[in-house]
Amino acid sequence: MATLIQQHHAETQFAKSYVAEVYDLVKKRNPNEREFHQAVKEVFDSLIPVLEENPKYMEHGILERIVEPERVISFQVPWIDDHGTVQVNRGFRVQFNSAIGPYKGGLRFHPSVNASIIKFLGFEQIFKNSLTGQPIGGGKGGSDFDPKGKSDREIMCFTQSFMRELSKYIGPDIDVPAGDIGVGAREIGYMFGQYKKIRGGYQAGVLTGKGLAYGGSLGRKEATGYGTVYFVEEMLRDIGLGFKGSTVVVSGSGNVSIYAIEKAHQLGARVVACSDSSGYIYDEQGINIETVKRLKEVEGKRISEYVVEHPQAQYYLGCSGIWSIPCDIALPCATQNEIDEIAAKLLISNGVVAVGEGANMPSTLKAIYQFHENKILFGPAKAVNAGGVAVSALEMAQNSMRLSWTFEEVDTKLQEIMKNIYRSSIKAAQEYNAPGNLVVGANIVGFKKVADAMISQGVI
Ligand code: NDP
Ligand code: 2IT
């Protein structure tokens, strides 16, 4: 008869080989989708102890099912530019998993968008949305359209064409898109108008991140950046530290970065650097966030303009150099894989204490390994940046009730949600023998709820 240790060993081997088999299948079925493979690998590596403990997840084929989107929509987006020339872009919506609620997730407009990018983002969104504790499934979409340098008319023309097709597949109880890179309040406004026109009815809950005059929620604009800082504050609190008196580096200068910088300053930190895809600025006195807001949110300028108004600051070409700046806290808030192994080692040798991922998958797997090996506090994206989608779900709730909460009410709920995500993730990490490992903890908490719901609903 097998001893308990032998039995445990056999179960571990079984769970490991099941994970390896499904991961191989993912690579075979989705060739060349590097980012999607990366996101799957990170989640799968966390799940082995959960599968050992709950063989039912293997028996019900949960991994095979969870990596296969329920629906992938790819469509043509034709539009006419200001010269009268017809342009054609590619649009996507990946409806990944609806076990716990309607598909929910942003739309990204960036020339780098392809099936791999949208699938990695959609896959991450399943677990992130589950972590928030709200009833929302996972989805993502976007286009390879480049909003840079486009006139307002071109943006409207493109977004209307995009929505003409997307409108067939979304709805307040079906799939609720929102913003992401290159999609903010202006784009959501045009898409909402087009959806309303096509449907001939006012369905406020079909999109989130709307303007305040037509169903948007106070606090949504700030939610991802503020939530990122609230989460990292929880991480720091556990070792008796906080933002107060710390030096912080934030990459990017878009929606997430701006409000992460603002909240970090409010908590007494000095944020000394931020960036865009062309370069980064260093301001030893602390970045003037009002200048960044005006340059980026109102005037649509490059971050290099900052030094014209603040001559004490320096501008450096190239965005990756930002990680060579010594800091206590690093908040990558721009894009995927912006911190590689070299950048991680630089941050570590310069004394970084905590890293919080405001962007989606900004650290490579090798970078994450470095942070863990060197006992750096590391907050993974699907936990750290969940505040954005969490407040989107609060926007949906307000739309359903036909009322609106005050900024303070929304912000208080956001703080509670971020604390809960931290506490449940740290608890799961402890329970599954990975104390302090928030990657493992967040993946497990996010996965279990969705997997249990999938089992309850049968093979559908
Ligand atoms: P924005 O479009 O508002 O800003 C993006 C910022 O990142 C810009 O400064 C942009 O610079 C920079 N950036 C984008 N792509 C690249 C690139 N390839 N290389 C270097 N820099 C780049 O987007 P958000 O702030 O909304 O999103 C930032 C990140 O946060 C993304 O990973 C997104 O998925 C994630 N996120 C966003 C949420 C939200 O609510 N908006 C919620 C959760 C996560 P440039 O202007 O030069 O392109
Ligand atoms: O990555 C994300 O969580 C988002 N872009 C926000 C999604 C949302 O539905 O608010």
Image (cartoon, helix red, strand yellow):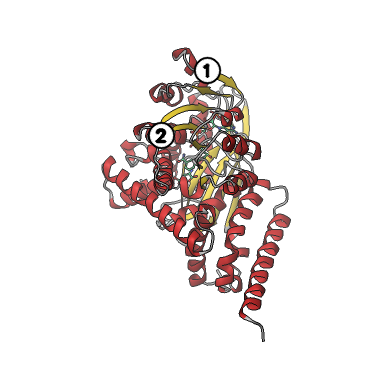
Q: Quadrant of the C terminus?
A: bottom right
Q: Residue sitting at 44 percent across and 60 percent down?
A: 427
The type of residue carrying mark 1 is Gln
Report which quarter residue 75 is drawn in. top right
Residue nearest the viewer, comparing 346 with 291: 346
Q: Quadrant of the N terminus?
A: bottom right
Residue 199 seen anywhere in this rendered image of the structure: no
- Reading the image, the residue beneath label 2 is 259
Q: Is the residue marked by circle 1 packed among few (<14), some (14-19), or many (20+) residues within 10 Å?
A: some
Question: Are the residues tagged 2 and 1 within 8 Å (C-beta)?
Answer: no
- Reading the image, the residue beneath label 1 is 314
The type of residue carrying mark 2 is Tyr
Relative to residue 366, is residue 268 depicted above or below? above
- Label of residue 265 in the image: none
Secondary structure state at the residue bearing disc 1? strand
x then y, percent, for residue 332? 52, 37
Report which quarter residue 258 is drawn in. top left
On screen, residue 374 versus residue 230, left or right, reads right
Q: Residue sitting at 49 percent across and 29 percent down?
A: 253
Of pointers 2 and 1, the one earlier in the residue sequence:
2
Q: Is the residue marked by circle 2 packed among few (<14), some (14-19), or many (20+) residues within 10 Å?
A: many
On screen, residue 403 versus residue 429, left or right, reads left
Q: Residue sitting at 66 percent across and 51 percent down?
A: 37
On screen, residue 266 versus residue 438, left or right, reads left
x then y, percent, for residue 325? 55, 28
x then y, percent, for residue 17? 69, 67
Count up the numbered dots: 2
Residue 125 seen anywhere in this rendered image of the structure: yes
